[in-house]
Structures are given as C-alpha cells and as structure tokens.
Image (cartoon, rainbow, N blue to C red):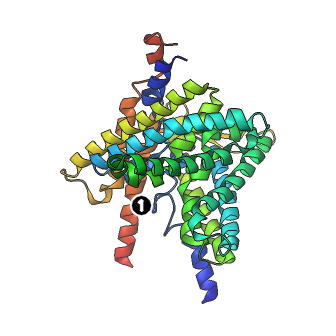
Amino acid sequence: MSYIAILITYIFISNFILVQFLGLCPFIGVSKSSESALGMGMAVTFVTSIASVVCWCAYQFILVPLSLTYLQTITFILVIAALVQLVEMIIRKISPPLYNALGIFLPLITTNCAVLGIAIINITEGYNLLESFFAGLAAGLGFTLAIVLMSNIRERLDMYPVRRAFKGVPIAFISAGLMALAFMAFDKSLLTNLHLV
Amino acid sequence: MMANKHLHELTKGIFKENPTFIIMLGMCPTLGVTTQVVNALGMSAGVLFVLLCSNVMISLLKNVIPDSVRIPAYVVVIASFVTIVEMVMHAFVPSVYKALGVYLPLIVVNCIILGRAEAFANKNTVLDSALDAIGMSIGFTLALTLIALIREVFGAGTITLIPIGDWDGVVSIPGLRTWPVRIMTLAAGALLLMGYLKAFFGWYSEKKQKRG
C-alpha cells in the first residue's frame, strides 16, 4: 500500500475511535474542552508515531531473531511505558512550553488502547518500517480529528437543553454515534476511486 | 458481619459499581467485540481469568512491590496473564481468537484490570481481591452479553453461541433474519446503543436512590 493510502485508511476509513473503538476512554474523558482535546490529540499522535517505529524495531530485530514472538504483548507494553516516560523527560528538558501543553496528558497515554493497538496492527498487517511510521502517524491524526470534532460538539451541546438522563456521557456517545455514521461515507471504494490501490 | 462484607465485595461489581455502565471503564473491547454473543462471552472469559489472577497476584505481592514502580510492576503481571490467555485461546478456540483479533492483547490496557489493581487489590486481602475480581467480571460479562444480544438480534437476526455437536450454535430469529436493522452491527450502532443504555442505567439508578 502506498503511504497516502495508509494515511487515508487510518485517518478516515478505519478511524481509530469511530470505527475501531480504540482510545475511547480519553475520547469521552478529555473531550469536554477543545483546548485539552487538541493537547491530548497531539500527545497521542506524537507517541503513536514514535511507538510504532520503536515497537516495530523491537519486534523485527529482537523478538524475531530470538523466536520469542509470543512475548509480543509484554514487550510492546513495556516499550511503550518506557518510551512515554522518556518522551516526558525529554520534552520537559528541551521545551517547557510544549511540556506545559502536553505534559499532563502523557502519563495517561501509556494505558491508551490506541498506542498498543497500532503497534500490534503494524505487526499483523505486515507493514515495513516506514509504513509502520505512517500508520502510527495516521492513527494519531485520526484520533486528533475525532476528539477535536467531539469537543466542539460537546461545547455547543452545553448551551442547549438536554434531558437530565442524557446529560454528559450518554449524549456524548450518541453524538459520537452520529459522527460515526457520517464517517461511514469513507470506505474502501475511496481508495480505488483515488487510484491508490 | 464479616460474611456480609465479603458478600458486598462480590456483589457490588454486578450492579452498584458495574464496570461498564456505572464506572465506564474498559469501553474499547466492550464496543469492539460485541457484534456476536460468542465473542462477548470469549472476551468476558479472558477478562475474568486475567482480572482474577492479577488481583490475587497483586494482592499477594502488595508488600513486596515498591510504591514508586508499582504501575509498571502491575502492567508486567497483567501482560503475563494476557499472554497466557492469548496462547490458550489460539490453541483451543481459534475461531474466537481470530474474531477477537487486536482486542485480545488489548486486555493489557483495559482500564478495568489496572483500575482494580490500583484501587482495590493493593490495599485489600487476597480473599477480598478475588471476590472483587469475580464480581467485577460478572458485571462486565452481563454488560457485554446484553450489548451483544441487542446488537446481534437486531443487527443480524441471529444469536451465535458455542457450537455443540451437530448444532452449529446459531439461533435465528424469523423476521429479523430477513430484514435486519443493519446499523446495529456497525460501529455507529454500537456508539448509539451505548449512549441510550448509559442514559437508561443512569435514570434507573437515580430513581432507585430517590426511592431508597
């Protein structure tokens, strides 16, 4: 698959949140204001891109030669946890403004399904190193797109009367469902129509 | 009194603190695997095993693990049990293993398991932790089965269970089989259904509180 096809696939066609439900907890939890949604989205994109590459290398250069591929899950989660810690320390050292923007979201990302999810998907889909990087980037961008759209919807919703039982999380889920309906317009035929496969 | 407390640890997860509908943890697998009842049951079995083992293990190790590295330690314990589940399912129920796909290894980052380790198992006794794990898993199973039943019955007109002998394990519902409400099996239907169910359970528990 070409890199553009990978980008379109993971941003629109199989959007991580709206189609695959990966990373739903922060999607509901952090989408109350558009500012924090954007921060979370950027932090996730940052980590999924790096984690895709590092996990791919760990799998191909350590686990495969030693035929320890069944340790995939443990290795990936440890790599991601260490990576998030490292990224946090580096950002704090070199760019305090960026740290102020992303810092509080980084610890939450270790247990975000999206990061471990893309690392595993890269292996099951058999992507090479560069394809993995693009898949990670696109997964993060798709997450950002969905969470930013969602936070804007929720900010608007605050101004409208909503029945008490539906206030907060339930109406957020229903809005997400309607958004997912809209995203169904993107399917595999998009790639064929754009002559990407 | 003591027996009552143990019973409370067991039953609180089923309704009062239901992990899916009340505390809203572990949403990703909840919506991802509930297109068929059999997948929901497979997922629940995996979560039960991992939650029970990790709760017991962490409760046993709670005085040994240093506080500063407790989260990585919990993650390693949980990931080991998830690997066991993956290997067992791959060997014995390959069809369920395939259907669960990426969601099976993702049990590692299921918030329910890490949440219970952090909030319960590291300060309670082994027995209470085990009971808590069983209760939470039953709550999770009920929630998943309910969602899967609604989605499969309306979306495909079938109920897929485990095949036994000659029976292929599929119950079909006349009418819905021919004219299914296709959206229920799609991603959008899952999110909509979750919103309505959450609203219903919120309304119900509020009503009960007012009365009690």
Left or right? Give the position of A152 relative to B200.
left
| Residue that sits furthest to the bottom in the current view | B1
Q: Secondary structure at mark 1?
A: helix
Question: What is the quadrant of the N terminus of chain A in the image?
Answer: top right
Q: Is residue A61 visible?
A: yes
Instruction: Name above or below for residue B30 compared with residue A13.
Output: below
Along the horizontal axis of the image, is A147 left or right of B165?
left
Residue A93 at x, y percent in the picture: 42, 50
**Does residue B167 appear to the left or right of A126 in the view shown?**
right
Chain holding disc 1: B
Q: Looking at this view, is A165 or A31 the one in front? A: A31
Q: What residue is disc 1 on?
A: B201
| Quarter of image, res A46 | top left
When asked about the image quadrant of residue A11, the answer is top left
At x 56%, y 52%, the residue is B144
Count of all numbered marks drawn on residues in the image? 1
Query: Which residue type does callout 1 highlight?
Result: Phe
Residue at image location 61% in from the left, 77% down from the top: B124
Residue B17, percent from left and from top: 49, 67
Whether residue B13 is visible to the viewer of this picture, yes or no, is no
Residue B59 sits above or below residue A106 on the image: below
User: Which residue is depicted at the point 53% across and 56% down?
Assistant: B111
